[in-house]
Amino acid sequence: MHNDTIVALATPSGSGAIAVIRLSGKDAIKIASSSFKSVSGKNLSNQSTHTIHLGHIVDGNKTLDEVLVSVFKNPNSYTGEDVIEVSCHGSQYIQQEIIQLFLRQGCRMANAGEFTLRAFLNGKLDLSQAEAVADLISSDNEASHQIAMQQMRGGFSSEIAKLREELLNFASLIELELDFAEEDVEFADRTQFKALIERITFVLKRLIDSFAVGNVIKNGIPVAIVGEPNVGKSTLLNALLNEDRAIVSEIAGTTRDTIEDEISIGGIGFRFIDTAGIRETEDIVESIGIKKTFEKIEQSQVTIYLFDASKAIDTLEDVRIEIEKIRNKYPQKPLLVIANKIDRLDDIQLAKINSTIADVLLLSAKTGFGVEQLTNSLLNLINTGALRNNETIVTNTRHYDALLKAFEEIQKVQHGLETGLSGDLLAIDIRQALYHFGEITGEITNDDLLGNIFANFCIGK
């Protein structure tokens, strides 16, 4: 049901300075009015939209709290319905007392994402904008925040909607031709239609390709830190994170599992994975850790190979061979080679490392020397040109899937135009492409899809 009045806590659960309780629905103002006593004697039902009022929430003769009540009247609200937001003190007891009071007066508890679902159903947001709301809430670095904001403002959906509208116009003309099939007329200019299909193909390719960048930006770029045991991988992780997240000891093989942590560098989220050291071992537990190391390299976007410069100074050729093995095993994966613990070496030894190992970064995780150069190198590996140019970047797997299907249908249309396919068969492929475009923005939807999308939202949003 979407015509009843719902209520939920809109701020995180737990105690705090304030909490916000949100109501939405046809009886939201009426229900709030029955429990609100304004300090100036105002009746909420008579107040203008987008106004705030000081007063008390009362349950019979019992005053629950002094509050500020914000009034948003339909259609000028987030959900497109009448909305009330009660800002109360952040005591969990107060929050629950007020919510329980509203429930007794006719509200029901909102489902996950139901406020945003109502915004979609009432035409305040299209589906891709609604999904961007969840991405915005979960964004934890500048890049993911920027992408979510652009999508929420309609950058992605407006681009798709424009292409869909142009394609729909041609589809209508081709459908019209079918009504005059016996007279052999063409209402749709085939030259203009080919140009449109080429433009749509170009845009779809760009959007599909952007998912490779967008997905890792949204979820954090995984960076595996690998090397022999006790070369300082955990110390490097701590230096990058500025905290003692990993266990550091002098005993070789301490890290028996993988350790993950995320930091933001230049607005991009990097997920650093400290792995068990790679070496021959008979220890069953440690060998499992080493197996996981190779699994993490497979899953990572970037690999850092770290070696102890102080111990490897006389075996640099062995180190070089080991690096080449990794490069050959993962030729497409960027590899940063780092000589750690250089604070223990003299200038002659450092020169030897530079001459033996190509493109090596010199670093001391203990003192912090070289950490900034490492972070700059990581940033240089990530293609954020589209982000800097404020281009549309796809981060949503559902959108990516729909774009792939739309692209497949557009390819069929293009082939049909080139081979002189009849209008009725062209129309079938065009309709399929339009369907997949509509899936993205929500012109075409079903209850299962909506349930799936909004179930991932937090309650209160």
Image (tube, helix red, strand yellow):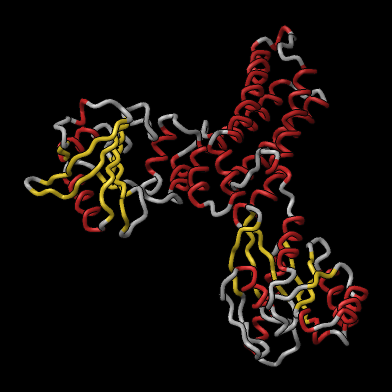
* Image quarter of residue 241: bottom right
18 sits left or right of 457 in the view: left
Q: Which residue, as the protein is rendered here, is positioned at the far top?
A: 183
* Image quarter of residue 333: bottom right
Residue at 68% over, 78% down: 366
91 sits left or right of 241 in the view: left
The quarter of the picture where the C terminus appears is top left
246 sits left or right of 79 in the view: right
- Is residue 131 visible in the rendered image? The answer is yes
Q: Which residue, as the protein is rendered here, is positioned at the far left?
A: 61
460 or 267: nearer the viewer: 267
19 sits left or right of 341 in the view: left
Q: Which residue, as the protein is rendered here, is positioned at the far bottom?
A: 282
Judge whether 244 appears above or below 99 on screen. below
- Is residue 321 visible in the rendered image? The answer is no
Judge whether 450 appears above or below 379 on screen. above
Residue at 57% over, 39% down: 151
Judge whether 36 appears above or below 89 on screen. above
Residue 259 percent across, percent down from the top left: 60, 74
* Image quarter of residue 235: bottom right
Residue at 63% over, 30% down: 159
Residue 364 percent across, percent down from the top left: 73, 76
The quarter of the picture where the N terminus appears is top left
Residue 358 percent across, percent down from the top left: 89, 69
423 or 345: nearer the viewer: 345
Residue 197 percent across, percent down from the top left: 74, 27
